[in-house]
Amino acid sequence: MKGFRTAALAAVLTVCSSFAQGQTLSDLISAFSGEWYSFDRVRAQSGGVCEIDLTTETLGNVFVARSKSCGAGLDLLGAWGIADGQIVLLTEDQRTLGVLGGNQTRMTGDDLASGRSLILERRQPSGFVITLQQAIRNQSCLYVGYTADCSDKTDVAQLLAAKADATVPLTTAARLNLRNQPRRDAPVALVLDRLTQVSAFECLTASDGIWCKVDVDGTVGWLARNGLRQQKWAVTTFELATEGPVLEVQP
């Protein structure tokens, strides 16, 4: 989506009735305020990691937000609020930059300023990420699926270059969930069999590796490239495709 979307923010901070019972606006502000990070290389500026701070300092009917070492739209961040149970990122004059959902350790959604998807994470990684990162440190490489073959590190640059008019063909290396957001707790839209071929039109870097956005017969979702085999071995779940048959997708 190009350009900014004008947000109807008059009721941003008065939507408590739409939240789950027992979950107050104050609870949500407390849960989602504070420091968040984007590890997307496109957003990193001045050699740093893109960092944003969602403060509890009021700015009219929203809150002050700040960014550091950020580009690709997040450099315009000046405020934030909550609407319809989602986090809304705003410019200081309250134009919408992004709309995010998720949990207290990872938020995902759409960045309306740059047209890219957005992953924001806390500094402290989740338990799964800690286990995955430890497995990677203990290995000489990332294994491909259930094999003992090492993944090609040079594939990363090509994956991160994926875009709508220059898609990157992929082949799954294991049976793999297609999720509707780049979060491991997001709903599963489809399950792809091993050796299914798809094309990625966007890939992002997160603390748990690369996530790629694909379209499978009209179902758009995200594939996590890194996974754990037997809760011990760090693996890649898909690789750059070579020529071969496209297998059926299992609902």
Image: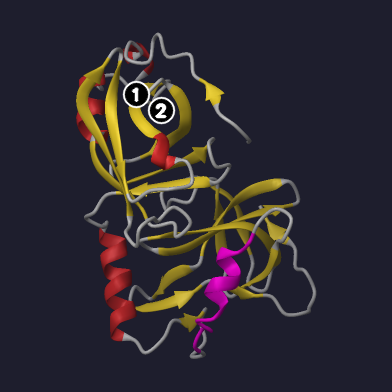
The answer to whether residue 24 is seen in the rendering is: no
The answer to whether residue 223 is seen in the rendering is: yes
Q: Quadrant of residue 195?
A: bottom right
Q: Where is residue 54 in the image (x, y as percent from the top left)?
A: 26, 34
Residue at (32% x, 15% y) in the render: 13
Q: Tell me where the magenta segment starts and ends, as one range.
A: 150-162
Q: Position of residue 191 (x, y in %)?
A: 60, 58
Q: Which amino acid does label 2 sit on?
A: Leu
Q: Is residue 132 above or below residue 19?
A: below
User: Which residue, given by chain and number where applicable, does mark 1 sit on?
Assistant: 81
Q: Quadrant of residue 28?
A: top left
Tell me the mark number nearer the camera, choosing from 2 and 1. 2
Q: Position of residue 73 (x, y in %)?
A: 47, 41
Q: Is residue 155 magenta-colored?
A: yes
Which scheme is used to colour this image of the protein? secondary structure
User: Which residue, given by chain and number where applicable, does mark 2 sit on?
Assistant: 90
Element assignment for label 1:
strand
> Which quadrant holds the N terminus?
top right
Counting other residues with Cα less than 10 Å from the Cα at mark 2, is it few (<14), some (14-19), or many (20 or more)?
Answer: many
Q: In this view, does 15 lie above or below 95?
A: above
Q: What residue type is labelled 1?
A: Gly
Q: In this view, does 182 lie above or below 154?
A: above
Residue at (55% x, 72% y) in the render: 157
Please say if the residues under marks 2 and 1 sit with CB atoms less than 8 Å apart: yes
Q: Is residue 144 above or below residue 224?
A: below
Residue at (33% x, 57% y) in the render: 49
Camera-side residue: 32 or 145?
32
Say whether disc 2 or disc 1 marks the residue closer to the N-terminus.
1
Element assignment for label 2:
strand
Residue at (43% x, 69% y) in the render: 227
Q: Is residue 88 magenta-colored?
A: no
- Indicate left or right for 18 with 134 as reference: right
